[in-house]
Image (cartoon, grey):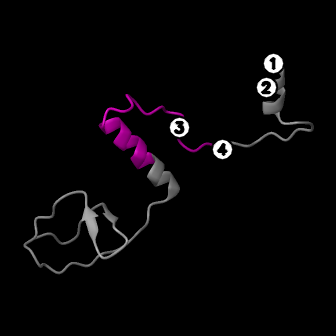
Amino acid sequence: MIRMTTLQGVYDGQHTIQLSSNLPLPPNTKVEILVRALTTKEKKERMLQLLLERGVIQRIAPGHRESNYEPIAFEGKPISETVIEERR
């Protein structure tokens, strides 16, 4: 008998949670559910993994994860405007 396991699923907004895998339990077995919503980072990781599994992407780039990005402050118009002007 299963004492405790972690499963993943999707809540339909009503009364049903669709599990991503089957449980070896008989029908009408009472269970207790602990709900923890995924963080934005976890959602991104799972989406990338799903795309990889389905063959949409060939690999997950090592630099895609969150970084210590710090924007650089500067005076003047946005760089994007300068780039557009120079392309004309």
Q: Mark 4: which amino acid?
A: Asn
Residue in the picture at 44% in, 61% down? 38
Question: Is 4 in front, or is 85?
Answer: 85
Q: CA distance from mark 4 to mark 2?
A: 28 Å
Q: Dividing the image into 4 quarters, which one contains the C terminus?
A: top right
Q: CA distance from mark 1 to mark 4?
A: 34 Å
Give, as a single range, the part of the protein colored magenta: 45-68
Between marks 4 and 2 in the image, the one whose residue lies nearer the viewer? 2
Q: Residue furthest front?
A: 88
Left or right? Give the position of 46 relative to 9: right
Asked whether the beta carbons under mark 1 and mark 2 sit within 8 Å of each other, the answer is yes
Q: CA distance from mark 1 to mark 3?
A: 32 Å
Residue at the disc numbered 2: 84
User: Residue 11's x, y, as percent?
Assistant: 34, 67
Q: Mark 1: which amino acid?
A: Arg
User: Residue 61's x, y, as percent?
Assistant: 48, 31
Tell me which label, 3 or 2, sits earlier in the chain: 3
Residue at the disc numbered 4: 68
Q: Which circle marks residue 76 in the picture? A: none
Between marks 1 and 3 in the image, the one whose residue lies nearer the viewer? 1
Q: CA distance from mark 1 to mark 2?
A: 7 Å
Q: Mark 3: which amino acid?
A: His
Question: Is 28 in front, or is 16?
Answer: 16
Between marks 1 and 4 in the image, the one whose residue lies nearer the viewer? 1
Residue at the disc numbered 3: 64
Asked whether the beta carbons under mark 1 and mark 4 sit within 8 Å of each other, the answer is no
Q: Residue furthest left?
A: 26
Residue at the disc numbered 1: 88
State whether residue 10 is above or below residue 52.
below
User: Residue 22's x, y, as percent?
Assistant: 16, 60
Q: CA distance from mark 3 to mark 2?
A: 27 Å
